Every structure is written in structure tokens, then in C-alpha cells.
Amino acid sequence: MKMLRAFFIYIILFSAFSLHAGQKPLTPQIDVDFDSESVYAGQPFQVQISVTAQGEGDPQVSIPQMKGIDVIDKSVSRPSSSYSMSWSFGTGQNARQVVKKQGTWVYTLILKSREAGKRTIGPISVKIDGYTFKGRIYPFNVLEPGAQLEVADDAQDSVAQEVGGNSNEVLENVRIDPDYFIHMIPSKKEVVVGELIILDVYLYTSVGNLSVNQFDKEPGTDGFWVERFEDDDLRNIQNKRVTINGVLYERVLLKRLAMFPLKSGELVIAPPILNFTAGSAGMGFFSMGRGKIVKRAAQPVTIKVNPLPDVDKPAGFNDSNIGNFNFFMDVSSKSVKTGEPVTVTFSVKGKGNIRNVVLPSLEEIDGVKMYPPENDSEVRVRGGGVSGMKQSKVLLIPNSEGSFTIPEVGWSYFNPATGKYETNTVKPVKVTVEKGTSSFAGGKVAVIKGGNNTNSSALSRVNSEMKTIRNEIDVTLKTPSVLSRWWFLGTLFGLPFLYLGFLFYRFNKKRSTQLYEKNRSKRAKSSALKSLDSLSGKNEDKGSSAYSDLQKILTTYLEDKLDAPVAGDTMPELNERLGTRGISQELTGMIISFIEECEFARFAKSSQAENRVGDEIAALKDIINGVESATIVPVVKKRRGAI
């Protein structure tokens, strides 16, 4: 009677496992995300298809051919870690190991539409364990290429009110999303050529758990000279709480640029595209979600740039000199000797596009040789603008005694704050030149004999412009030659012996490694048992680390015994590998069950698991003895060049 009852219980359990193993998988979750809110004809765009599924194998995704769309590139990202569960049913030769794994596969497509119009993606088919599931159709609109510089039809003006403050800010041409949106705010929308514009890029969000990744596309700066702020870093973002249409948003400053228009007309700042992750925090250990990747684009901003006024415009004015500056000149010395240098420094200091400022040039002066100027600038981009100093240094060398005058120099700039041209003038400076000497302390002027008049004249000019220094050097050899030093001889004859010794060491090391790998399978059992005996002697740690050590010992033993990497195998792959190498189904089931018990004990900590470490050590020894008694089928390795 007892045997009959046990037989019926076995039949019921076997049927339950069989039905569960062969049942239809759960319907996968299919999500399609575009890298931007707008798609333009002729321009590549990215589509990510995320498939969250559960099954014994990887899902197979099929996408119907898309009319008018070319596939430039495609890739797949498999889950680095996924939750899996497994069970066995049957015994002996009929035993079967079933492993169900669950994760999210991301398929990335780089597409390009040949022309504007309405397009669709889908329906997307997903095949799992022989079952096919179909998703919905995803429609989207492809715009003309020039539409990216146009404001969207649904953009509107709105007002952002600061929480706890009295300041209101008008948001022009903004597309408000209830969760998050991007908006650009320029300090001015009408300027003159070269006038400073400060552009702020903000993220408005009403939800938490956002992780900002990067800008997929920076704000368009065609027609502008751009200086980046020194504190332009996402780690130094400035936050403010505002309400828009009754909804509370967190306003985050993402980027700030100093922009100077280089030409007149209507210049369009192309919208940036921001990549961030939403809902990435607060997920459980077995959660399938990894956060939703979101991309948002701002609306373009148009700046009206007026030309500089012609009224009172100085002759020869350079349009790069726009700002609020001070101009001054410095002369290094007002009394020199012939051949001694004089440095004239022109400096401009103030606020504006200091890096592009053009400084005045110095006219030729009779009896003075003039060298090309050296320019240097120091720019600071902070807080409310761009400031700094730019210098131009001119080197003068007088050729004759007497005096010369550095003439009066004027420099003009346009001040946008006053709307007027302003000119700074420096007064002339007189420099006295005394006769220089032809010889100097510690040296003499060199003279070349037998040269023609041209060479003598060139040499005399060099001697008159530069101070010649001649050092008295004794070239008598007072020390023995290096070739006779003992350390040189030792190095010369010792290096060949060192090289031969190095070659002998490399040969012995390579031979030892080959012998070690050759006997790897024979040492597998002794190494594993030694590690188990060492683990048995540890009384201080019987927790999850012991199970981690047991799993590592088994994996290392199998790799040594089979001479194959098994650490990265999934359970079905390990089951197949052991079967092809001659391990019986019963012993294979014991190995896989042992690995799963170790993994369970590592993550599900309990006192019972800690007390069973000794039993698990004994079980692992039985597994090792079983593998040793099996006949291992060798792997046939193809010879190099074989077909």
C-alpha cells in the first residue's frame, strides 16, 4: 500500500513538473524609444528596442522591413546579470534540467529616412522557447531637414514662478512636458555684432530619481564665437524650485555658454539634446527595471544681430573690438645704449571678447630695428561675463646713438552699453640712445678674416645688435679616456652575458609553464582536496563566504580536469559541456544542484545553511571522486592549417 501511494505521488509530481516546464512563457514586455523627439529626413537617428522576457533561451526579435528607411547599423546588448530559476524532473537517463532566466535585452538600431513623411516601426515579433509574440506598431513623423531650426507648432509662452520668491521668468516658445523638458534662455535676443550673449540650458523636472548622463548634441553655435564658463560642469549644477501652470518643477542649470555673434542677421541656436535616466533609484534586488533612458530636446532660439552703426565710426575700425575696455602702453626703458633692446607693450583690459581683440601696430622708426609682435591673452569666464587682458609686445633695438620717439598711438572700440565708439590715445614716448661699447667684460667680439664685404657687413650688424660673450675654455685633456675606465669595460663585456642569462631564464620559465599545463588534469583532484581540507580547518567563518569558496573550488576543479573554461557557462551550457565530455546525467545533475545550492546559500543567508557547510564539503568530495572514476572524453583540437 505504501509503495502504491509513493508511486501515485511520483506520477503527480512528475506531471506537475512536466506541465510547468512545457507551459507557454510569459508575454514579454516590448518598449521602443527614439533618441530624440524629432526625426529629420537624411539624418541618422537611433531607436532602442527593449525586450524584457523570461525563458530558457535568448529572445529572437524580428522587425518587418521599414519602407523608406535604411538601416545603417545594429547591435544587441544582453543583460549582464539576470534572475534565473531552475529545477530538475525525472531520474536516470530521462532526467532533465530546466533553467528559466529573466532579463532585459536591448536592440539598438541606427536608421536614416530617405525622405520626410509618416513612418512606422513594427509590429515587432519576439520568439521565446518556440512561442511567438507580436507587439504593436509604433508610428512616427519624419520632418524636413530645415525643420530642426524651426519652433514646433505646439510650443507656447509660459511663466515660471520661483517658489518662496517674487521673481517671475517668461519662458518663450517652450514645449512643457508634465515630467521633464529642456529649455534654453539667452540673456538677450537682440544684439550688435560682437556683443556678449549668455546662454543658459535648463532641465525642468517634476519627478525624482533622475541621473543626467550627457548631451547627445550640444547647442548649435554656428556664427558665434563661444567661451565656456570655468564652472561649466554637471557636478556644479544650480537648482531652483519653480511652478509652471500650477505644477512644481525643479529647475537645474546644465550648461552656460558665453557667445559672441560674428556676423549680422538672424542667427539660430540649434536645440541641444540631453540624455538622462529616469526612475533608476529605489529598485529591489530582483527588479527587472534598470531605469528608463530618456532624451529631450529644447526648442531653437533665434538671435537678431544688428550691424555696427556707421555714425561716428573711426576710420579703419576693426569689428572685433567690441566691449568695455581700457587701453594703455608701457615702455621698458627710456634710456638705453646701442644694441640694447627696448620692449613696447600694448595692453587692453576689460570685459568683452578679449581673445579676439585686435591691438594696434607700431609704425617703422628710423634707426631702430623692429621685431614682429608677440601676443598673449588671459581670459576669465566667470559669473556674469567674459573679462581679461590681452597684450602685444614689440621688441625694438636701436642701431645708432641719439634718440628716437615712439609715436602717439590711438585704439578704438565699440561699447554696447553706451552704443558709442570710444577711442583711447597714449602719448608719445622719447627714448635716449647712448653709444654702446664693442667689447664686454669676460669676452671679445669675433672677427672673420678673408670674407667679402657683404659678409663683413652682416657680421657687423649682428655684433651691433647682440652682446657677444666669449668664455675662456681649456680643452686640454687632463683625465684618462672613457674607453679605458673599468666600468666601461665591465659594461661592454658584461652585457652579452646578461643577455644570454635572460634568454636562459625565459626558456626555463616557458618549459616550466608547459609542464605545469600538461599535468594540470592530473593535479586537479589533489589541489581540490587540499583546498577542501584547508576550508574544513576554518572555524571563524561558516557563512556565505564558505559557500563562495566551495563553488570556486568546484569550478576550478572542473576547469583543471576538463581543460576548459567553465566559469562563465550558464546551467544549460554546463549541462551540455559535461555530457559531451563523458560525465553521466546523474553526476551532472549533482554538480548543477551543488552550484545552485551554493548560490542560494550565498544570497539567502540562514543559520541552517551555516551549519551545513561540513555536509557540503563531504558532498563535494563525493562529486570529485565521481568525476575521477568517469572516463573523460578528450577534446579533439584541430591542427593549425587543417581544413
Image: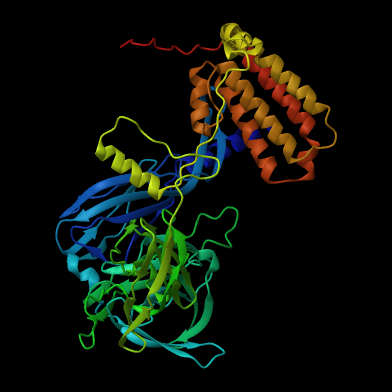
Q: Nearer the viewer, residue 441 or 210?
A: 441
User: In the figure, residue 620 lies in which quadrant?
Assistant: top right
User: Quick one: which residue is furthest to the bottom in this view?
Assistant: 166
User: In the figure, residue 583 lies in which quadrant?
Assistant: top right
Q: Is residue 244 visible?
A: yes
Assign the C terminus to one quadrant of the image: top left
Q: Residue at x 48, y 39 (%)?
A: 444
Q: Position of residue 122 (x, y in %)?
A: 26, 56
Q: Nearer the viewer, residue 309 or 315?
A: 315
Q: Residue at x 36, y 57 (%)?
A: 400
Colour scheme employed for the rendering of this structure = rainbow
In the rendered view, tell whether residue 20 sits above or below residue 189.
above
Assign the N terminus to one quadrant of the image: top right
Q: Position of residue 602 (x, y in %)?
A: 69, 41
Q: Position of residue 104 (x, y in %)?
A: 45, 50
Please state if 324 lies on the left or on the right of 18 as rendered.
left
Q: Position of residue 405 (x, y in %)?
A: 36, 70
Q: Is residue 293 visible?
A: no
Q: How many marks?
A: 0
Q: Nearer the viewer, residue 604 or 568?
A: 568
Q: Residue at x 51, y 45 (%)?
A: 440
Please state if 537 lies on the left or on the right of 326 as rendered.
right
In the rendered view, tell whether residue 35 sits above or below residue 247.
above
